[in-house]
Amino acid sequence: MSETSATRGHLFVLHGRIENFDYEAALIPTDHRFHVTPQWPASVTGDLDRARPANWPSECGRSGTGDAVWFISVADEQLLTDHELVGRVNSALREIAEADVPTPDRRVVRRVALPVLGIGAGGLGGRRGAILGALLDTLRSAAFELGLDILLVTSDPAVFSAAQHARRDLGGRGSRHWELDPAELDEAKRLGGLAADGHLALFLGAGVSMAAGLPSWGTLLTTLGERVGELPDDFAELGSLDQAQYLAARLGAEQLNEAVSKSIGKRRKVALAHALLAGMGCREAVTTNYDDLYEVAVEATGRPRPTIMPWQAVDRRRPWLLKLHGDIDRAKSIVLTRRDFVLFDARSRPAGSLLQALLLTKHVLIVGASLADDNVIRLAMEVDEYLQQSEDRTEQGTFVDVSGVEARKRLWTAQFRWFVCEGASSAHRVRRMEVFLDAVAAYAASDAPWLLDQRFDGLLTERDRDVVVQARRLGAAADQASGLLAPMRRALRALGGA
């Protein structure tokens, strides 16, 4: 991936809700009367009593409040054509690209969030396949040309799946779509295939949540130190675990953990990585993070919120998430100090064994971690030692590295595959990670709950459409058949059959 490509715009497809993301501008559908459907929260639209653009009725316009919200009319007196809709989208995105909208220093490219336009109250839902295909082409080109990162967000599983299938079916142009070289795209396909087969598990480190604005370990300790007041002159010379141990001695262990929970707090804005990982549909995940942002991202897809281990019993209907170092809702469980780490094995040996079981039986995708955690290192090395006797040994997982430290790769090459995100700064490397995970998520989408739904026919070739029509007839006939054909009926309904 070249340095230039890292600063070009990119189209991300996300399964969730727009209000859960951090962005600089939003594009919200309305109609020529400026009727905005009630589903939109004020956190996205702003004050609708004052938001009507001065030029309305119009094809698009910026909120009258001056907020970075653009409204686009997707419903005039007559239904829009595909060409008219994407023309208005292009115009709105150009306005946004030219507008004076502040972009945070931590952001490489300005972000614009929007839903799949026109298929709801816009009245174009009967042609959602054609609309979706036209939008994907338009948004991909606009992102690249205008230098915007476009977040196309949907909470509808069928629309999300259809969008991912459409993005993959690019006739060999996938590497151009994701700005990945052939080897990088092959790696994304491999990991996506593992997720689709149920063989991929996740490990989330602090870097994922830091991208959502949560503090780093060092920043957290600095904040906690302010509660103590005056610190020894050589406090900074202590390692982070010993700094935490000192703070625990001054504040009290329980008070320190309560302070950690309050410092992290409850946030609703997830990082792109949270949403992209949640969109892969993995059933098993492990994290060293205390926050609940991954859970929020999973729930926003419409799937059940993960079971949080070890406090909740595993439920076959829900994915699970093992929190190795505790949870902000359970302050006493937080692992932070030297004492906590030394006693980790005695207190939490089954949790460590569960991570080791995943390293032995699944392929673990490690994101946002530095592999500097002594407990995680020990567990991984024990697995590595055990596997020395294997006759056909493979890697325990894939490490997505945004550290910029080449030596770390050399330390772990025998244990993990390595995907290095290059870039001159941490922000550039994190964004490359996001683009890569976007490709993995696209190739992880194996379900197709839209395939037999007539509203998506616009995504199909003529030959595929003929086959789908026959499948619909088969479904209608199966509905009249005996219970022996129940498995066939379920399979066809899972593909969007009536």
Image (tube, helix red, strand yellow):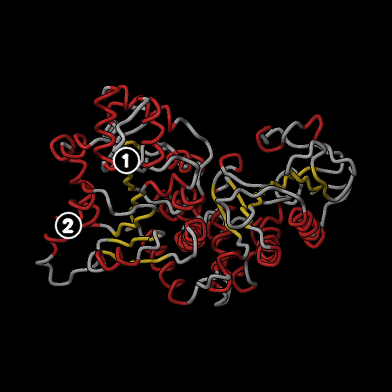
Q: Position of residue 285 (x, y in %)?
A: 33, 47
- Identify the residue under disc 1: 236
**Element class at badge 1:** helix
**Which sits in the foreground, 170 or 2?**
2
**Which sits in the foreground, 64 or 215?**
215
Q: Which mark is residue 381?
A: 2
Residue depicted at x 47% and y 51%: 273
> Could you tell me the amino acid type at mark 1?
Ala
The answer to whether residue 340 is left or right of residue 327 is left
CB under 8 Å between callouts 1 and 2? Answer: no
**Number of numbered markers:** 2
> How crowded is the residue under tag 2: few (<14 C-alpha within 10 Å), some, or many (20+)?
some
Q: Residue furthest front?
A: 233
Quarter occupied by residue 215: top left
Q: Position of residue 140 (x, y in %)?
A: 65, 64
Q: Position of residue 238 (x, y in %)?
A: 26, 41
Q: Which mark is residue 493?
A: none
Asked if residue 215 is positioned above or below residue 476 in the image, the reply reads above
Asked if residue 18 is positioned above or below residue 457 in the image, the reply reads above
Q: Looking at the image, can residue 52 be seen?
A: yes
> Could you tell me the amino acid type at mark 2?
Met
The answer to whether residue 410 is left or right of residue 385 is right
Q: Position of residue 492 (x, y in %)?
A: 49, 55
